[in-house]
């Protein structure tokens, strides 16, 4: 079990975090900093710490869903909302017209590193082929 000791020291009653809180849950909880570009009751969006393109934003549900495999039918509205936020952020970042890519990685073969569902919004330059090293076409 994980306790936020900063909160303990501040005299606030400590919140017990989920045992395996990911880095994104800590960002959502405000426990570690991030460059947040959007926040509402369903999602948060912040700049990727290791950008792969001039614009690289992560759109993350507030609800900690580990992977696409863990999505439930009840998540449909929130998932649609992720696209709406992606559309609006692309416009705000000035990359809508030239275009961009939305990526959701899942598990080992997808190259997922953080097990809290997220959508990458990347753009701001030509992104090249969709997949590198593909030999299946
Ligand atoms: P994945 O491979 O799981 O789809 O992508 C995870 C992404 O999260 C990576 O692009 C990585 O750079 C980003 N990331 C990992 N840790 C942090 C962090 O602490 N802050 C931010 N802003 N991005 C992170």
Image (cartoon, rainbow, N blue to C red):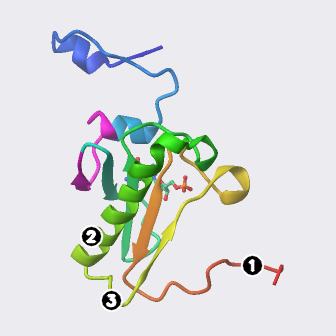
Residue toward you, 86 or 27: 86
Q: Earlier in the sequence, mark 1 or mark 2?
A: 2
Q: Which mark is residue 22?
A: none
Q: Is residue 70 magenta?
A: no
Give how far across and how far down residue 54 sits, in percent. Answer: 37, 77
Give how far across and how far down residue 112 sits, in percent. Answer: 61, 52
Label 1 residue SS: loop
Left or right? Give the position of 123 relative to 33: right
SS assignment for the magenta stretch, majority: loop
Left or right? Give the position of 105 relative to 101: right
Label 3 residue SS: loop
Q: Which mark is residue 97?
A: 3
The residue singled out by tag 1 in the image is 133
The residue singled out by tag 2 in the image is 88
The answer to which quarter of the image holds residue 28 is: top left
Confirm whether residue 48 shows in the render: no
Residue toward you, 106 or 78: 78
Q: Earlier in the sequence, mark 3 or mark 2?
A: 2
Disc 3 residue crowd, few under 14, some 14–19, many 20+, Cα 10 Å: few
Gap in angstroms between the C-alphas marked 3 and 2: 12 Å
Gap in angstroms between the C-alphas marked 3 and 1: 28 Å
Gap in angstroms between the C-alphas marked 1 and 2: 32 Å
Give how far across and how far down residue 132 sits, in percent. Answer: 68, 78
| Magenta span | 28-40
Q: Residue furthest right?
A: 136
Disc 3 CB within 8 Å of nearest ligand 1 atom: no
Foreground: disc 1 or disc 2: 2
Label 2 residue SS: helix
């Amino acid at each position: 079990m994980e306790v936020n000791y900063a909160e303990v020291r501040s005299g606030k009653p400590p919140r017990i975090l989920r045992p395996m809180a990911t880095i994104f849950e800590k960002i959502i909880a405000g426990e570690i900093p991030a460059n947040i570009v959007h926040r509402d009751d369903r999602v948060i969006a912040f700049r990727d710490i290791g950008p792969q393109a001039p614009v690289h934003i992560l759109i993350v549900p507030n609800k900690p869903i580990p992977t696409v495999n863990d999505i439930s039918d009840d998540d449909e509205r929130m998932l649609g909302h992720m696209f709406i936020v992606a559309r609006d952020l692309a416009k705000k970042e000035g990359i809508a017209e030239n275009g961009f890519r939305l990526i959701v990685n899942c598990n080992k073969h997808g190259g997922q590193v953080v097990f809290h569902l997220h959508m990458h919004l990347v753009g701001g330059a030509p992104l090249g082929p969709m997949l590198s090293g593909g030999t299946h076409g």
